[in-house]
């Protein structure tokens, strides 16, 4: 996978396909929430998120990608619908930084949007 494909897969919640590309020293800074470090910490968080995402339907209302060779930024707006048709909208901006062919750092800004 290219750097852009890795970043897009991660932002589209296809986490497992990105695991082989994670640096051993990866850092994921979830701004305002937590800082995760190391491959296993990232995978654990992704698996927890994936479990939740199996209970909702996700629609990407916006998915913009800006890229350079080693930096990818994805600005997205997603709508999540649960089994009771309760909706939530989330705006996110994820910055992916690559080093030596591996995903080295993710910085995520996320906020729930009230209609």
Image (spheres, helix red, strand yellow):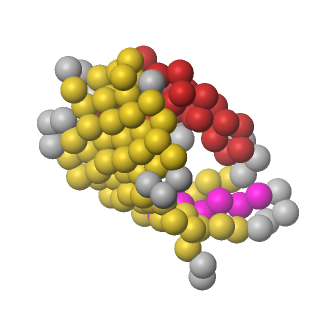
From which residue to which does the magenta span run?
Answer: 77-82
Number of marks in picture: 0
Q: Nearer the viewer, residue 30 or 8?
A: 30
Q: Is residue 109 left or right of residue 86?
A: left
Q: Quadrant of the N terminus?
A: top left
Q: Nearer the viewer, residue 62 or 109?
A: 109
Does residue 7 appear in the picture of this structure? no
Q: Quadrant of residue 104?
A: top left
Above or below: residue 70 compared with residue 102? below
Residue at 26% over, 37% down:
97
Residue at 42% over, 51% down:
108
Relative image position of residue 21 (x, y in whole percent): 37, 21
Relative image position of residue 10 (x, y in whole percent): 45, 38
Does residue 86 appear in the picture of this structure? yes
Q: Is residue 106 left or right of residue 57?
A: left
Residue at 22% over, 26% down:
99
Residue at 20% over, 20% down:
100
Relative image position of residue 17 (x, y in whole percent): 48, 25
* Magenta stretch prevailing secondary structure: strand
Above or below: residue 42 compared with residue 60? above
Q: Quadrant of the C terminus?
A: bottom right
Q: Residue furthest right?
A: 84
Q: Say whether residue 58 is magenta.
A: no
Q: Residue furthest left?
A: 69
Q: Nearer the viewer, residue 94 or 40?
A: 40
Q: Say whether residue 81 is magenta.
A: yes
Above or below: residue 12 compared with residue 31? above
């Amino acid at each position: 996978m290219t750097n852009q494909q890795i970043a897009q897969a991660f932002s589209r919640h296809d986490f497992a396909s990105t695991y082989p590309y994670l640096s051993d020293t990866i850092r994921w800074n979830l701004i305002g929430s937590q800082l995760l470090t190391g491959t296993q910490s990232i995978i654990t968080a992704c698996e927890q998120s994936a479990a939740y995402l199996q209970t909702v339907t996700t629609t990407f209302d916006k998915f913009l990608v800006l890229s350079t060779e080693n930096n990818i930024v994805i600005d997205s707006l997603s709508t999540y619908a649960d089994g009771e048709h309760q909706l939530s909208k989330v705006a996110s901006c994820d910055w992916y930084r690559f080093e030596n062919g591996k995903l080295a750092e993710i910085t995520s800004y996320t906020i729930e949007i009230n209609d």
